[in-house]
Image (cartoon, rainbow, N blue to C red):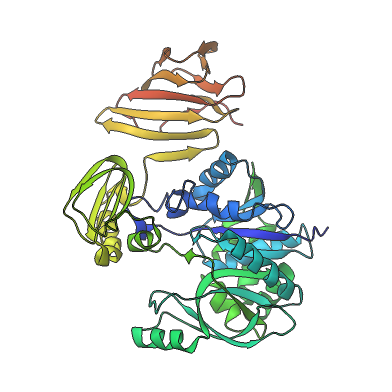
Amino acid sequence: MSTGLITPVILSGGSGTRLWPMSRRDYPKQFLSLGGDHTMLQETAFRVDEPSQFAPVLVVCHEDHRFMVAEQLRRQGQTTQGILLEPMGRNTAPALTAAALWLLGQDPDAIMLVLPSDHVVQDVPALRAAAIKAADAAQAGQLVTFGIDPSGPETGFGYIAAGAHLTEFDGIRRVDGFVEKPDKAAAEGFIASGNHFWNSGMFVFRADVLAAEIERFAPDVGTASRMALSEGTKDLDFFRLDPDAFAEAPAVSIDYAVMEKTENAAVIPVSMGWSDVGSWQALWKIGNKDESGNVIKGDVMQVGSKDCYLRSDGTLVAAIGLEDFVVVASTDAVLVAPKNKVQQVRDIVEQLSKSGRSEGVTFPEVYRPWGWYKTLNKGEGFNVNRITLHAGGRVNLRRHRHTAQHWTIVDGIANVTLDGTSHLLEPGQSISIPAGAAHALATTENQPLSLIEVQAGPNAGKDEFERLEYA
């Protein structure tokens, strides 16, 4: 049944290598607070949190990120229509086809607003106004992309060549073509023409129109996505696309699969303070600067530095006399680079991968259905975690055969089950769990719980537990 509302479809993919060490393969940039007080995923969802215009969001993400997506949206009290889980990355065409087919099962008249989860938009009213105008054109069968009014001849973005105005739709123009990242001279020519716009990767179209155009121009994408949906399974608050079927989909972008081929491609030019936050230098450009041109985030002290991006999410950063530098400290790694060299961070991530180090892949904070934990310290035979359960969270009955644990309650009241006996623990109290003991942990009185866990034993820090109870 049609709601008449625009459905935001948030694409939450990406590997996160360009913003290392804050962003990792298992913890990409959309889950970080980079452009504001909230994470980029949360900011994206906030932009369309207007029930008179937009339906609840539908999120498409990798299955490894499902708990982070669910937890971050839960923290801001935002509901979803669903969370579709990709078993592997296949670019945007299969992801959006699966989303369109899923939506058509709920609403045959669904209109999709496609939003990448890792972009910055500083003028939210401009985004919403553009989405509403684009929806009018989409209702008539147009596939509308958002063209960003360029502020300069950037060579790191693709461009959209805009053609004639569609007079029946306010602010909408035909697409004359798409241009991949140009060289400097071509980009300067595009700016001078006044008819080229940065390609934002944001779209508005009817779900049925997208599905039809996929069948026309990329039928193999349609076949694989339809099968992945029909053979998929519901899992808690998620829907898992079938891995074997989805693997058959070619890895292709929606631009290449449809937008470059359809006769109904349109563009709405818009200025909304947009950035794809593709590097630390990009974050410096959009950040709030001090009188010396420095963007400073976190625990940082500086003397005599100029035009730098200085950030700490871990230990104190002290900078003296730096100019045009990026210094970023996470809890387990530090990046130091000239601003004009930050794209080479990919080379560092590649070296980390080749040497088998975890810092390019994982992050100390790990999300689970019940909450999250963060590794504070580890070494041979021991591991220390900060564990937080959200209200109503429960870690089901299990045992560690070779690892002893000691829990000290920091905040909230813990209901600990140890070998069949229940213990209620308040802040400051603790309990020891011998190796081999059956144990479970839950919150009480509908409030969150925080504790410090110390593990000791030959397998400390490893997921070697045996489940004794399933949800």
Determine the residue located farthest toward the right in the rendered image: 1
The image position of residue 325, as x and y in percent, is: 23, 59
Is 104 placed left or right of 452 in the picture?
Answer: right
Residue for point 47% across, 53% down: 30
Q: Is residue 227 visible?
A: no
Q: Is residue 38 visible?
A: yes
The image position of residue 4, as x and y in percent, is: 79, 61
Classify residue 365 by image quadrant: top left
The image position of residue 153, as x and y in percent, is: 39, 79
| On screen, residue 455 above or below 109 | above
Is 302 placed left or right of 38 in the picture?
Answer: left
Residue for point 40% across, 53% down: 25
| On screen, residue 413 above or below 354 | above
| On screen, residue 40 above or below 152 | above
Classify residue 86 by image quadrant: bottom right
Classify residue 376 by image quadrant: top left
Q: Which of the pair 46/74 is nearer the observer?
A: 46
Q: Which of the pair 103/287 is nearer the observer?
A: 287
The image position of residue 165, as x and y in percent, is: 66, 86
Determine the residue located farthest toward the left in the rendered image: 321
Q: Quadrant of the C terminus?
A: top right
Count every numbered label the image shows and give the total: 0
Residue for point 47% across, 35% down: 372
Determine the residue located farthest toward the front in the rendered image: 291
Is 342 placed left or right of 462 in the picture?
Answer: left
Q: Quadrant of the N terminus?
A: bottom right
